Amino acid sequence: MSASASHGPAGRIRIVLVGTQHPGNIGAAARAMKTMGLSRLVLVAPEKPLDEAAYRRSAGAEDVLGQAPVLATLAEAVADCRLVLGCTARSRRVRLEELEPSAAAGRLLDLAAEGPVALVFGRERTGLTNEELQLCHASVHIASDPEFSSLNLAAAVQVLAYEVRRALLGAAPAQAPSPRSDEQPATHEQVEGFFAQLADTLDAIDFHKGRAPDSAMRKLRRLFLRTDLTVHEVRLLRGVLADAQRMARLAREAGNAHPPLSP
Ligand code: SAH
């Protein structure tokens, strides 16, 4: 198979660089991608615009640089993605499933048959924030020396791009899936819409009772991100939440109409 840059599954694999500090690293990442047949680069809030160093270090991958959109947030960059994997040099407090690069590449390729997928890379100095990692379905770690675990950004892109290439070359031709439209997997944006309504509902039914809401939401997010929710399942869950919110409202109104008798 040709595994060319813009067609087939390779064309649905997005490399997202978040908050990059050195434009030269963006150029080197574009080069790393192009050598492996990838071309979909997305930049999220880079610290500086692309400059001469970026183009020099792209060493012929100017086309990849030139077509890279620049977006303000990671959420926008992955809104339509079927799978989002965040690359981290070290484990964080946010406990996500951790994949090694070849497993990550395999999973990306499987799901690229269904829609866009993203591999996300963080800032040179500080990596990805915990909030950004929470937008990811799983993390990817390149086994490195724990005492010196952080690869150069473009080197990390190269390792993952190579694994994607190997997976592509080894993969059987993708079967076109044709499930009913509501049995399609939900997009990232649809699942985030469900999470927002879940958070509102937990407030409305006074679930937290004074405890910090973050911890429960983090666990619930992890639970639902582990499953492959379909469009229909998201609709069903949101229907359940809407009813819970309606019952909470009725209970509140009834409470207001009949204030408790004083002892
Ligand atoms: N000091 C930062 C390292 C940033 S290196 C930190 O501790 O997070 C820039 C980016 O390259 C990281 O955000 C990550 O996306 C990627 N990267 C570097 N080393 C990596 C490794 N060993 N495994 C996976 N990704 C890595």
Image: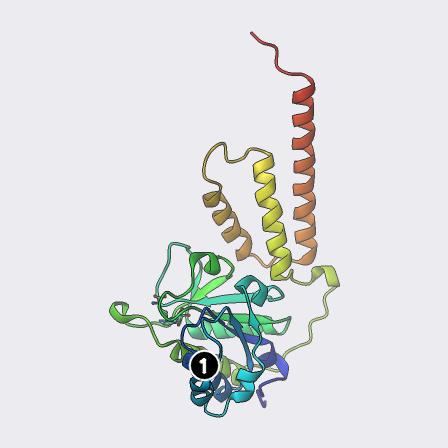
Extreme residue toward the left, this view: 147
Measuring 44% from the left and 58% from the top, which residue is drawn there? 96
Is disc 1 placed on a helix, strand or loop? helix
With 70 as the anchor, is 249 left or right in this view?
Answer: right
Count of marks, rendered view: 1
Quadrant where the N terminus is found in the figure: bottom right
Q: Quadrant of residue 24?
A: bottom left
Q: Quadrant of residue 158?
A: bottom left
Question: Where does residue 139 sit, x and y in percent of width and height?
Answer: 44, 64
Q: Quadrant of residue 117?
A: bottom right
What residue is disc 1 on? 29
Instruction: Give the answer, above or below, for where 131 lies relative to 201.
Output: below
With 129 as the anchor, is 44 left or right in this view?
Answer: right
Measuring 30% from the left and 70% from the top, which residue is drawn there? 149
With 168 as the anchor, is 245 left or right in this view?
Answer: right
Q: Is mark 1 within 8 Å of ligand 1?
A: no
Extreme residue toward the bottom, this view: 60
Measuring 41% from the left and 69% from the top, which residue is drawn there? 123
Colouring used for the render: rainbow
Say if residue 72 shows up in the picture: yes
Question: Where does residue 92 sit, x and y in percent of width and height?
Answer: 37, 58
Question: Where does residue 50 sit, x and y in percent of width and height?
Answer: 48, 80
Instruction: Give the answer, above or below, for where 89 lies relative to 211.
Output: below
Q: Tell which quarter ligand 1 is in.
A: bottom left
Measuring 45% from the left and 81% from the top, which residue is drawn there? 29
Say if residue 38 shows up in the picture: no
Q: Nearer the viewer, residue 89 or 222?
A: 89
Question: Where does residue 210 sit, x and y in percent of width and height?
Answer: 47, 33
Mark 1, other Cα within 10 Å: few <14 / some 14–19 / many ≥20: many
